[in-house]
Each structure stands twice: as C-alpha cells, then as structure tokens.
Image (spheres, helix red, strand yellow):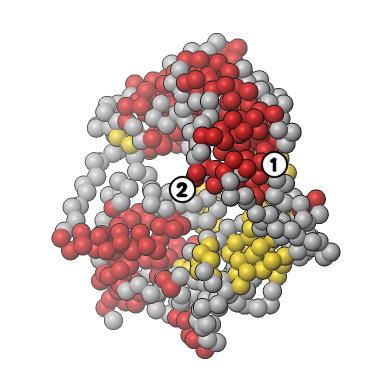
C-alpha cells in the first residue's frame, strides 16, 4: 500500500469507462508501472471468451517521465470523465528486504529516501474537452436512475451506495432496469445491485438468462443458483456465445445434480481445452467420480471428449490432489480402457504430467505418493508393447510407490531438534512477511512471477544452491518442475546466517516436505565460499558445486 496526501492506493491498472476521451479510448486499460516511471495503454479484444491485450502505441507509451520520483500506482476514471493518476512520488519503492548494499549506498548518496511525504494526483483531460462533474442525489429513490449514466465511476458509486443502504423501496426500479433498460451495461449493473442487496429473484434471473445480449446472459449465469434455475441454465448449453457457455461450465462444474453433470458434458463436447479446465475448476475432490461418469459414455463420444482434453485435465487433477485412494482408482480406470486407445492415452498423459525438457540439466526431485498396495493395473500397463504407453508409464512410475516396491526405500524423516524447530518458526515468520507476496502462502508461486517452492528440486536438493539464490539472487532462465521461468530475483543480503537458515529450514519442511533442516553454520560456510561472487547467480553457475569444506577450514 502507498499513502499519497490522504489517498491510500494499491498498485493496479484502471479501465477507462467514460466518454470524455475519444471513443477509441473506451474500455482501454491504463497500466501504471512505478519501476519504469511510465503508464502503458493497451486495447482489449475478445474472441470465444478469451481476452487479448495489445499495446496501443508502437515504440512509445501513453505517459512517461524522466523524473525518477514519478511512481504512478493507480489509474481511475473520475466522476467527471477525466483520467486520474495516483503518483506516490518516491525515490525508493523497493522493500527494504530486497535492497543490496550497493543500492543502499546509492540511495543515500543521492538522497532518494527523502522526501517521503509527497504525492501527486494527475487529472488528464483531452484538449478542448469540458469535463462536467456528476454528483449522486441524496435521496435513495433517485439513485437507481444513475445506473443509466455513461460514466462507469457514476454507475459503480450508485451501485455501492444502493447496496450499502439496502432500501427495499428501490427494488422494483432496479428490477425494471434489469429487464427493460436499453443499455446492456445498465441491465448488468442493475442485476449486480440486486444481487448485492440479496433481492435477486429466480424470475429476474430467468429473464436475464434469455437476454438478447450475450454479456447480460453471461452475467446472469454467474449470479444464478442452480438449485432454483438449473432447468433454465441447461437450455444455454448450446448458446451461440462462447463466453456464456464458458461461464456455464464454471457454474455447473460445482453442482452435484445429475442434470448439471449432463449439461456440463454437452458443454465439454462442443468446447475446447479451456472448457475442460473450467469443468475441472469446480470438481475439486470429485474429479475421479466425474471421470468415471465420462468413461461410461459410448465410444462415439471420444472425438468430442478429445476436443476438450477433459480426460487428461481431470487425471492430472487427481494426481495433484495427492489422495492415494483416488490415484489407485484412477489407475484402475486407466487399466480398464482398451489398450492403447485414445481414452487410455489421454488419462496417462494427464497422470504423467509435463515431460521434462531434453536439455534440462538441473537437479531433480520427486516426492512420490505412497499407495496402500501395489496397483494391479500398473503391472499390466508396464507390460504393454505400445511405445507411447511404455513411455508414459515410465514417467508415472517414480511418482507412485508402495510397500515392497522394488528399488524404493522408505525415507527416514529426521525429527527437528528444539533448536531446529526454533529456526523453523523464525523462518516461518520471515516467509510470512517477505516471501509470501510472490511465492504465496501455499508455496505454489505466481504464474509469470515466482516459481513454486512445493516439490521444487531447487528447494529440496543440495542446500548450497538455494542458499546462494536467497543470499545473492538469481538472473536468467531456470527450469522448475519441468517448466521454464525467466527470473530476476534479487538477493536478500539483509538477512544474517541464522535468518537464512530459518527461511530454508521452513520451506524444506513445510507443505509435507521432509528435507533436512539447514544450519546457520552451513550458511556461514557457503557464504564464505562465495564471498568473491557479487552478482545474481545464473543456472549454469549454480550447477557448479562450491567447496564448503575448504571455506570452513579457512
């Protein structure tokens, strides 16, 4: 959060939703980039329910500055139709945990840490435009009419105030707007206002589900309760709009009614992979049951199932769930399919997961799932003479184990001592304040930003590598669990050896990890061995071992 002259703002883009600017600006996204001292403008296009962004300009940005204290963090459409930019006007925007000694000295030499009580708000108006402020009336009964405004800020504010006041006297007016207003945007916003007031009735939703505009139908699907509107929802399975069908797949995937499952199947038959993902999103913990349902379909449906890739998607979800009983059921289902058939191959693909890159030379780590007993289907699949089947089973084999499996030794988990437990707790505290923003509470990371720590070969492999990454950072591409990440992770030299050991002990023992803890003395030795290294590591450098014993001897 950043505080700017009484304005508290979280960094985020803004969608322009007024008509003071030329019409080509409506719906554009303005993205503040405080680190680059600029604001980017992108246009959006939509096809088959998927939105794509493109730069509005070639070789330039909407707004840039040579002032290094220009730190835009938010963009808003104002009540007058102007575009408002919040600028926290700071010389330093890094968290102190990510500041290297070089940066600290540079900041102090140039006095970038001061002043820190400034802030700017820019009001951007097109040449020749005459902005006019719109105010909401005080009387609640006059506010629903404001939902017809062509200014998104006015509509949003009217919706918020109506929900907060929750006056039942305005419900009839809102119902009328939702059903008959000429503007699709107004109809949608009236629906959401009713939803926020808990005044949305099945009759109102049913009308909206049959609206002539797909955006209204899609919004109505999102607000629907299948318990009261399932028959109407089922009528939309062949809707001409991919967006409506996609929202319907999300909605129906979490409903246990047989009619919902049947409607979902129709959506899967006519949709692509994104529909398989939508179906899987609401089936958490029940993927194996729906797989069983799909596999009972006649072979004539195979081509449609393949189009949505749903068999592979659900099989992959079952593996990620790490429920031994469900994985055993999955293997039984796979083994019962025609050998080498499309269904068997699809589920094996999902179960095997992404194949590791051929050029990957990084460390490897598997946390196998222990089954109650040896699965009979596994032996049958391993005996297959089909090259594709054998290759997939070979990738699955190290991921599952059972008592008595040849070559597998039950790992002995070393209990943490009192001092190691204290390190773990200290590391948990630091992780929760620093690392959690990127790597998340679950350790699963963030797409495009931070790789997962759960089951990461870098976290659970040789500890000297993760020590080097934490203390000095990482630059360039790195493979993590078969996926390539392009990283620029800053080092954290602010942490002493005990704190680094605590962080690493925590992430090597959290999330069902069983790797050995890391001691402060080992961190000290690694740091001594790399004391002449002063920049972020590359993967090639990390692959070269460090002579910790030699450094410790000195």
Q: Nearer the viewer, residue 213 or 480?
A: 213
Residue 386 in sight from this viewpoint: no
Q: Nearer the viewer, residue 238 or 331?
A: 238
Q: Nearer the viewer, residue 137 or 284?
A: 137
Q: Nearer the viewer, residue 348 or 31?
A: 31
Vertically, is 296 above or below 195? Answer: above
Residue marked by disc 1: 148
The reply, left or right, for residue 83 in relation to residue 222 is: right
Q: How many marks?
A: 2
Residue 191, image quadrant? top right
**Residue at image location 81% in from the left, 54% down from the top:** 22
Percent x, y for residue 425?
A: 25, 60
Instruction: State the residue lying farthest toward the front.
Output: 139
Percent x, y for residue 219?
A: 61, 33
**Residue at image location 72% in from the left, 36% down from the top:** 183
**Residue at image location 27% in from the left, 70% down from the top:** 498
The label shown at residue 481 is 2
Tell me the element at label 1.
Answer: helix
Instruction: State the residue lying farthest toward the right.
Output: 128
Binning the other alpha carbons within 10 Å of mark 1 as few (below 14), some (14 to 19) or many (20 upward) gives many
Residue 234, image quadrant? top right
Instruction: State how far apart marks 1 and 2 are (Cα).
Output: 50 Å
């Amino acid at each position: 959060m950043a505080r700017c002259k009484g304005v508290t703002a979280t960094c985020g883009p803004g969608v322009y939703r007024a008509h003071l600017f030329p019409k080509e600006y409506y719906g554009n996204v303005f993205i503040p980039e405080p680190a680059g001292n600029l604001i980017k403008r992108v246009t959006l296009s939509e096809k088959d329910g998927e939105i794509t962004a493109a730069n509005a300009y070639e070789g330039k940005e909407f707004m840039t500055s040579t002032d290094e204290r220009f730190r835009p963090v938010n963009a808003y459409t104002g009540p007058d139709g102007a575009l408002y930019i919040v600028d926290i006007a700071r010389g330093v925007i890094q968290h102190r945990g990510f500041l290297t000694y070089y940066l600290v000295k540079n900041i102090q030499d140039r006095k970038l840490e001061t002043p820190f009580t400034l802030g700017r708000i820019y009001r951007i108006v097109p040449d020749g435009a005459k902005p006019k402020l719109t105010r909401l009336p005080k009387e609640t009964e006059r506010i629903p009419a404001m939902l017809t405004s062509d200014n998104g800020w006015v509509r949003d504010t009217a919706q918020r105030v109506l929900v907060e006041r929750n006056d039942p006297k305005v419900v009839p007016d809102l119902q009328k707007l939702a059903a008959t207003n000429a503007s699709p945007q107004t109809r949608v916003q009236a629906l959401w206002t009713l939803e926020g007031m808990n005044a949305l009735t099945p009759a109102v939703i049913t009308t909206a589900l049959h609206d002539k505009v797909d955006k209204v139908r899609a919004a109505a699907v999102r607000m629907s309760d299948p318990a009261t509107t399932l028959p109407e929802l089922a009528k939309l399975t062949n809707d001409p709009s991919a967006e409506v069908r996609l929202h319907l797949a999300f909605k129906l995937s979490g409903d246990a009614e047989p009619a919902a499952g049947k409607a979902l199947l129709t959506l899967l038959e006519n949709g692509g992979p994104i529909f398989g993902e939508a179906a899987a999103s609401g089936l958490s913990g029940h993927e194996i049951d729906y797989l069983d349902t799909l596999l009972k379909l006649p072979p004539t449906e195979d081509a449609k199932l393949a189009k949505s890739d749903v068999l592979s998607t659900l099989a992959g979800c079952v593996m990620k769930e790490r429920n031994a009983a469900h994985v055993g059921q999955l293997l039984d289902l796979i083994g019962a399919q025609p050998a080498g058939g499309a269904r068997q191959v699809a589920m094996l693909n999902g179960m095997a997961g992404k194949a590791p890159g051929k050029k990957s030379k990084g460390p490897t780590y598997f946390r196998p799932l222990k089954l109650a007993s040896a699965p009979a289907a596994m032996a049958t699949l391993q005996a297959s003479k089909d090259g594709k089947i054998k290759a997939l089973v070979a990738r699955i084999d190290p991921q599952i184990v059972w008592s008595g499996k040849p070559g597998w030794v039950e790992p002995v988990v070393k209990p943490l001592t009192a001092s190691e437990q204290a390190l773990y707790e200290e590391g948990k505290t630091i992780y929760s304040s620093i690392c959690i923003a990127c790597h998340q509470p679950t350790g699963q990371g963030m797409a495009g930003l931070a790789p997962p720590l759960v089951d990461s070969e870098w976290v659970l492999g040789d500890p000297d590598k993760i020590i080097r990454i934490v203390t000095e950072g990482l630059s360039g591409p790195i493979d993590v669990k078969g996926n390539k990440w392009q990283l620029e992770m800053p080092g954290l030299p602010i942490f002493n050896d005990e704190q680094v050991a605590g962080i690493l002990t925590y992430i090597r023992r959290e999330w069902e990890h069983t790797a050995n803890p890391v001691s402060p003395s080992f961190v000290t030795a690694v740091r001594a061995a790399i004391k002449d290294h002063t920049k972020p590591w590359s993967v090639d450098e990390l692959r070269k071992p460090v002579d910790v014993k030699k450094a410790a001897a000195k």
